[in-house]
Image: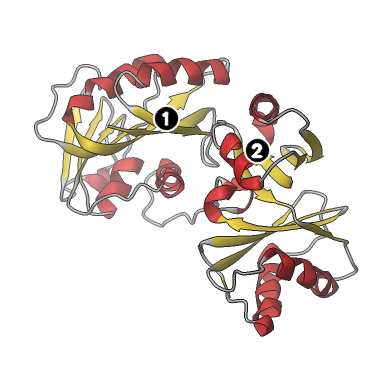
């Protein structure tokens, strides 16, 4: 099988180390551009995807079932792509999203109009493609040498966004960019805040996470030594506890979600998350940020993961598109 595999360029070397560790003997990675490889490996795409899903820095993968040469126009490219696309989609006629990704050395085409053109070209054959999320994805990755085409269930791609690049819209009322980081984590990990449920937000200042959870209808206990944004003053459902997460008196009652974006030593931050573990309802989810602070990211993630496993199931640790020098863990009580 072949696949296009993607990571953040700044962490490409670490992603490559992880890939070398999890992929079977006989696999080959050919670099298409920084942070993007063409993988050739034995076995099925779903099996290789499952292995890559255990990594931190691999953001996205999509199968390659055929290639299309670059022509002089997007129209000609789509005409040549159609036979490959129909082969990829055999047996799948609806619930399909078309994702187009243009690599750095690709022709100066716009991905949105190209995806629209592909959807329109598929329609006469009875293939119903949608513009938003769907169960199956037709992936088209275009570089200087040509286009790579493949189809797969969305969960096998590790991320619902092309290349794992979650370009979420900035809302006018956004307090900080951390709101998009949390939104990406919730979508990627399949965590749905429950309206009327309770959340505790550790390291809340200035309130990006808290504001998003309040918007989703949750009651939020926000914990921090710093101030929350004045825009959150008097917000319904908000309780603010001023103090450090490792020492503030524990609130009463059970919580359905814990979030922690603490700018501390990551092991100390893990201790704080564990301190709040008895307050979580069975099966409650957690979104926990692991800061690197210039250290060895893989080593830090391994140590913090072991510590968190004293109180939680660690379901995944991923380097998100909106993460900086950090990774995000999905926890479950």
Whole-percent x, y for residue 118 in the image: 70, 72
- For the residues labelled 2 and 1, the Cα–Cα distance comes to 18 Å
Residue furthest out toward the left: 252
Residue 91 found in image quarter: bottom right
Q: Taking 225 as reference, is 35 left or right?
A: right
In depth, the one of 194 and 87 nearer the eye is 87
* Circle 2 Cα neighbour tier, 10 Å, few/some/many (<14 / 14–19 / ≥20): many
Q: Taking 148 as reference, is 331 left or right?
A: left
Q: Residue at x 22, y 25 (%)?
A: 276
Q: Taking 120 as reference, is 210 left or right?
A: left
* Circle 1 Cα neighbour tier, 10 Å, few/some/many (<14 / 14–19 / ≥20): many
In depth, the one of 20 and 32 nearer the eye is 20
In depth, the one of 260 and 65 nearer the eye is 65
Q: Taking 113 as reference, is 272 left or right?
A: left
Examine the rendering and report whether any part of residue 124 can be seen. Answer: yes
Whole-percent x, y for residue 179 in the image: 40, 45
Question: In what element is the residue under mark 2?
Answer: strand
Determine whether 35 is above or below 191 in the image: above
Marks 2,1: beta carbons within 8 A: no
Question: Which residue is under mark 1?
Answer: 289
Whole-percent x, y for residue 112 in the image: 66, 66
Determine whether 286 is above or below 129 in the image: above
Q: Residue at x 45, y 33 (%)?
A: 316
Question: Which residue is under mark 2?
Answer: 7
Examine the rendering and report whether any part of residue 165 can be seen. Answer: no
Residue 262 found in image quarter: top left
Q: Residue at x 49, y 21 (%)?
A: 301
Which of the numbered marks, if any, corresponds to residue 159? none
Q: Residue at x 18, y 25 (%)?
A: 278
Which one is in front in this view, the residue at disc 2 or the one at disc 1?
2
Whole-percent x, y for residue 126 in the image: 63, 81
Q: Earlier in the sequence, mark 2 or mark 1?
A: 2
């Amino acid at each position: 099988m072949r696949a296009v595999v993607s990571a953040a360029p700044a962490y490409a070397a670490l992603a490559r180390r992880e890939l070398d560790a999890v992929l079977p003997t006989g696999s080959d990675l050919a670099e298409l551009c920084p942070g993007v490889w063409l993988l050739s490996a034995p076995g099925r795409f779903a099996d290789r995807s499952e292995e890559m899903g255990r990594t931190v820095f691999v953001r996205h993968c999509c199968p390659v079932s055929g290639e299309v040469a670059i022509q002089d126009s997007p129209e000609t490219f789509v005409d040549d792509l159609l036979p490959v696309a129909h082969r990829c989609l055999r047996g799948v006629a609806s619930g399909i999203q078309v994702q187009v990704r243009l690599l750095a050395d690709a022709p100066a085409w716009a991905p949105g109009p190209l995806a629209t053109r592909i959807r329109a070209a598929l329609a006469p054959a009875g293939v119903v493609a949608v513009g938003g999320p769907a169960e199956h994805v037709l992936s088209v990755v275009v570089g200087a040498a040509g286009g790579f085409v493949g189809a797969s269930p969305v969960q096998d791609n590790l991320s619902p966004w092309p290349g794992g690049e979650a370009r979420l819209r900035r809302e006018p009322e956004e307090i900080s960019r951390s709101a998009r980081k949390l939104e990406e984590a919730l979508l990627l990990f399949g965590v749905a805040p429950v309206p009327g449920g309770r959340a505790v937000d550790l390291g809340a200042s200035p309130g990006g996470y808290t504001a998003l959870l309040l918007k989703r209808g949750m009651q939020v206990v926000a914990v921090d030594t710093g101030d929350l944004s004045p825009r959150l003053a008097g917000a319904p459902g908000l309780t603010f506890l001023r103090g450090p997460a490792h020492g503030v008196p524990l609130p009463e009652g059970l919580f359905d979600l814990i979030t922690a974006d603490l700018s501390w030593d990551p092991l100390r931050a893990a201790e704080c998350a564990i301190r709040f573990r008895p307050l979580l309802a069975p099966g409650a989810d957690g979104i926990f940020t692991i800061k690197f602070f210039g250290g060895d990211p893989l080593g830090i993630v391994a140590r913090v993961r072991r510590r968190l496993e004293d109180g939680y199931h660690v379901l995944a640790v991923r380097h998100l598109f909106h993460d900086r020098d950090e990774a995000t863990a999905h926890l479950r009580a």
